[in-house]
Image: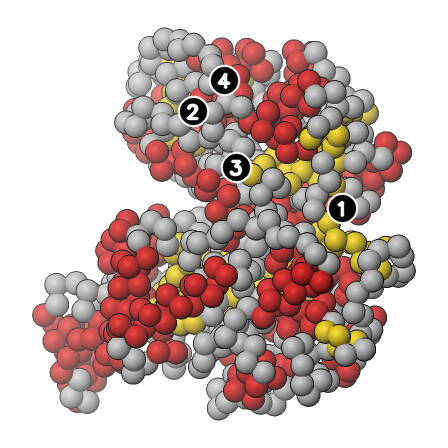
Amino acid sequence: MITHIVGARPQFIKLLPFYRALAAKGVEQKVLHSGQHWEPAMSEVFFADFGLQADHILDWSIDMTSNQSNMEQVLAQWRPQTVVVYGDTYSTLCGARAASSLSLNLAHVEAGLRSFNSNMPEEACRVETDHLADWHFAPSETAMQHLRAEGLDRGAGQTINTGDIMADGLMAMPDVKPDARSILVTLHRNTNVDDKAMRESILSTIHDLASPDKEGYQVAWPLHPRLRKAMGRDPSEDYPHIQWLPPLSHADMIQAIQRAEVVLTDSGGVQKEAYFLKRHCVVLRTETEWKELIASGCSTLLPPMAEDLYYPMRAAVKARCESLFPPIYGDGKTAEYMANALVHEGGLVKPRTLTLAHANPSNLHHHVSRLFHVITGWRLDWSETGMAWSDSGQLDVALEDASWMQCVDEGPTPFVASSAPDYLASILWAALRREEWGSESLDEHGRYQAVHSVMAQRGWLSTAICHRWAGALMQDHQLVGHRQMMAQPTVIIDVDHLRAFDGYPLSHHLLTLWRDLLKGKWTRLYARLLQDKDPFDAHDHLAMLQLSYPSIRWQAFAWVGPERNDHDHGLPGDRPLAKEALRLLHRIMPSMGSHPSYHGTDVMAESALLAQSLGHLPLRQRRHYLKMSLPDAYEDLPHGMAYQDWSMSYANSPGYRSGMGLPYPWLRQDGTLGHVVVPSVAMDQHVKGRDAASIARWLHALEADAMASGHPLVIASHWRFFGPNPAWADADCLPYLEWVKGMKQWMKERA
């Protein structure tokens, strides 16, 4: 039996075609309604339209734990083999957690979507759900790339580009001529509705567009209950030029979109419905998870503002898609593909699972199961009747116990049992960097020295050794890997010299010119006085590289310290020119994260400074090596600030610091999960003194090894090396010119 968990209007729409496809295969199904958005005006009308009723409706609570517990009670009674959750609401997350708590198989429809905005509750919901899911039904290739890059690829048949479920049915609908100068509006997000100034700005701007004295558009607006409650009165009294409608059934909503010339919305589902029905859409958000729609020009992103919104909105409404709505989200057979993934020859499919013997698994057993899942795509379960394995007993020992520091003198792994390698304890030891805990093997900057590590002495740094150990365990149990080839490498760019020469007041320029004159910094004087543009402004160069090599992922991290220190360079993030430059960079690298300063102590304050430029808190950060002492480094990271940390590498030597090549969750000392850690293997300072050709060969070798281990290559560099003429500005850039040439040669040859 399969249970579907839904709770919001878009989920009802996605449920119907999948339910029918499974029913055609004879699958027993039940629908559990979370009660999140249940009220007759919105929910009953949709279920009545679809001819489908929920088997159980819960009472929704503001307490997420209560919602999860209520779902667990129903699921424990029904005992489905597989639970299906949809999208990115709190119902999605509670359902995923409930299924995981009961060890039920979990499928996620619309997996892999990312807005890269940690302010959005939907982002946390979709990310955690993807981590818990056994099947990922991704709507696009971009979503697939996100899953692969985050180490969430479960392999062929379980992580699938199915296309978008909303395409089923909509793609076959005939074209309808819209009413001239007509706009359909929907608005429901808390950021647009709950803030009074923002809400009134949006309402008055749209009312002006409808006013006969201004634009004279015909504006139809189905009133969402949340907006109605926030307004507190009949909206037609204050905004009479708008045609206010009650909540529409799905069929009526589709007709309303077809009648409109333009759709203006903050809904993810309506964005796609407009696309499938070939209507230009203006998205009232700072970002969207449906990035392909923005890239294609079929949708226009319009960040809402509390003031001066009229002219940007008028321009956005008049824009049109120039690419004739290209096919992006599949062929309209998504429900069929998803049903085939869950049902085979009349029976429900089980996810690939290895069950090992243990009567009372600890938190460490469960965490190494997560790591094994990340590496191989296979679930690792525990049971008294499971298969025997080489168990050294380390997973039964508390992590803070000193025995975790003790490794065998010889052998293929740090821990053995009866002379046989204990691969699982070894994976956990490496991934948590246990030998670094409290280590005094530090350089003058307080950075851990890899040369003295067991990982280095055993030769385990040159490859993602945890992947080799996991592969050996699979061979022991005669398992076959199903991972897809992951060939898209990532280049991290630390934006450290953003606008290093521009953006300061005249007094600052005079003082620095005088300093350079006294110290004989002739190249700097030349760059400041005679260069046409800031020699550290690498925006144009990096934008060109992105266009030239689309198979490379680029991930920027912006230093935004409020003040400069000895090792922090460039324009502080609170300067107006820096903010504008960051906004420009964000357009070509929308996943840009925060790179806290060397001496900054308030990471939240620095991230908030970047958020002022981006319009949202960054999802990713890259803490500096000076802050990486363990186990305290990740214990100090505040919950809810950022989802990923990208500083897992060595400062002075290449290598896989944790033995992992894929992102993985960090285990805090209290047993809870912390940030997701993203490993990188090499950076520019590791190859000083080498020529471009040898650097290119080295990068090819690193990538070949990464692909053989089933993970993408991740390397790092600095913004200032890609400027129009950085060597003129700073002699420190000279040793890295060969690095830039070698990188370009590698990218060109692999293309």
**Residue 340 x, y percent position in the rendering:** 63, 29
What colouring does the structure picture have? secondary structure
Q: Are marks 1 and 2 in contact (CB under 8 Å)?
A: no
Q: Is residue 350 left or right of residue 199?
A: right
Answer few, some or many: residues within 10 Å of disc 1's Cα (few below 14, many 20 plus, some between 14 and 19).
some
Q: Which kind of residue does numbered mark 3 sit on?
A: Asn
Residue located beneath label 3 in the image: 161
Residue at 15% in and 88% down: 520
Which is nearer the eye, 455 or 519? Answer: 455
Q: Which kind of residue does numbered mark 4 sit on?
A: Leu
In three-dimensional space, the C-alpha distance between marks 3 and 1, rounded to whole angstroms, equals: 23 Å
Q: Is residue 737 left or right of residue 83?
A: left
Question: Which of the 4 quarters of the picture holds residue 33?
Answer: top right
Q: Nearer the viewer, mark 3 or mark 4?
A: 3
Residue located beneath label 4 in the image: 170
Residue located beneath label 1 in the image: 100
Earlier in the chain: of badge 4 and badge 2, it is: 4
Residue at 12% in and 68% down: 531
In the figure, 530 relative to 403: above or below? Answer: above
Q: Which kind of residue does numbered mark 1 sit on?
A: Ser
For the question of whether residue 463 can be seen, the reply is yes
| Image quadrant where one finds the N terminus | top right
Q: Nearer the viewer, mark 2 or mark 3?
A: 3
Residue located beneath label 2 in the image: 275
In the figure, 69 relative to 265: above or below? Answer: below
